[in-house]
Image (cartoon, helix red, strand yellow):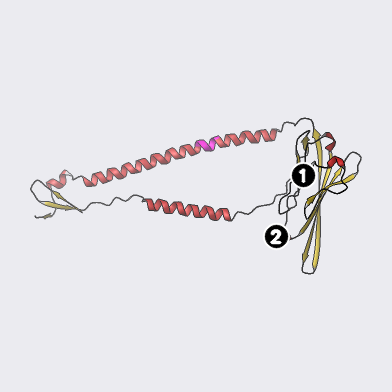
Amino acid sequence: MFVSRTYTGTLYLRRRPVVRSPSMATHTRLVLHLLLLFIFAVQEVRLVCVDVASDTEAVVGRVMKLTCIYCMKREEISAETKVDWFFIGEDKRKVLIYQYDREPQMPKDVEMYWKGRLTWKGSQDLQDISISILNVTLNDSGIYECKVSRFFEFNSFKHSTTKNTTIDLKVKMKASRDTTALYSEIMMYVLLVFLTFWLLVEMIYCYRKISKSEEQVQDTATDYLAIPSENKENPGPAVTE
């Protein structure tokens, strides 16, 4: 409430309007709530196992990953896992080239051709039991077999499961052009440009809206603080000095 004086020397009481605007505390509280919601959502994220097929085309001189996935069920997490990788060449001989038995290792009697050229690329939970071939050569073309065995024991009950995955690998001198990957890359860049432009438009719109809101608040406060001429000519109840 404030007091205004007219030309007659009489004081008039006028209630000053309360102009409310979002306080800093409100904005801070909203940001904290959103941050807590984000942290809760991140904590609820769980890794999902997806059984994907391996690439079947390799290039001479490069590294080739032979992908082998065997997803576990919840009750299989504590199972014991054993992995054997075999190679079948043109002579149709099935040769053990790599294995996992409590730890990744090469067989003791592995051929000299494979020594130092295979590396373990599996995951810690043994759902991904892939390997990689270093310095690929044309002789690496053939069929690779991934044999996974899991052994379970529930009290006195014992059970085992086996999964075989075959990969028919073709080695080429030069990589062929993958049109699907090219189109996917183009669409990714187009989507990135569109999202950037949309975000820029939204920022400009929000800035203008906030500026307009602040101007309206200032105008409203100025209008209420100004004493209209009608009130001077027709004063309300007066408080004498």
Label 1 to label 2: alpha-carbon separation: 28 Å
Q: Which residue is drawn at 64% across and 35% down?
A: 185
Q: Quadrant of residue 156?
A: bottom right
> Which disc is residue 74 wearing?
2
Q: Quadrant of the N terminus?
A: bottom left
Give the mark, 1 or 2, whose residue is nearer the N terminus.
2
Element assignment for label 2: helix
Along the line of sight, the residue nearer the viewer: 51 or 130:
130
Q: Read off the residue under disc 1.
A: 119
Residue 173, image x, y percentages: 79, 30
Q: Quadrant of the C terminus?
A: bottom left
Our reading of the magenta stretch's main secondary structure is helix
In the image: residue 152, left or right of residue 109: left
Closer to the eye: label 1 or 2: 1
In the image: residue 47, left or right of residue 70: left
User: Which residue type does callout 1 highlight?
Assistant: Thr
* In this view, 205 is above or below 5: above
Q: Do the residues labelled 1 and 2 touch (CB within 8 Å)?
A: no
Estimate how packed mark 2 is, as few (under 14), some (14 to 19) or many (20 or more) residues with alpha carbons within 10 Å.
Answer: few
Q: Give the range drawn in magenta.
A: 193-197
Element assignment for label 1: strand
Q: Quadrant of residue 111?
A: top right
Q: Is residue 198 magenta?
A: no
Residue 85, image x, y percentages: 82, 48
Residue 30, image x, y percentages: 44, 52
Q: Residue at x 23, y 47 (%)?
A: 224
> Given the current orientation, which residue lies at the most extreme bottom position?
156
Residue 113, image x, y percentages: 86, 40
Q: Which residue is drawn at 42% across and 54% down?
A: 29
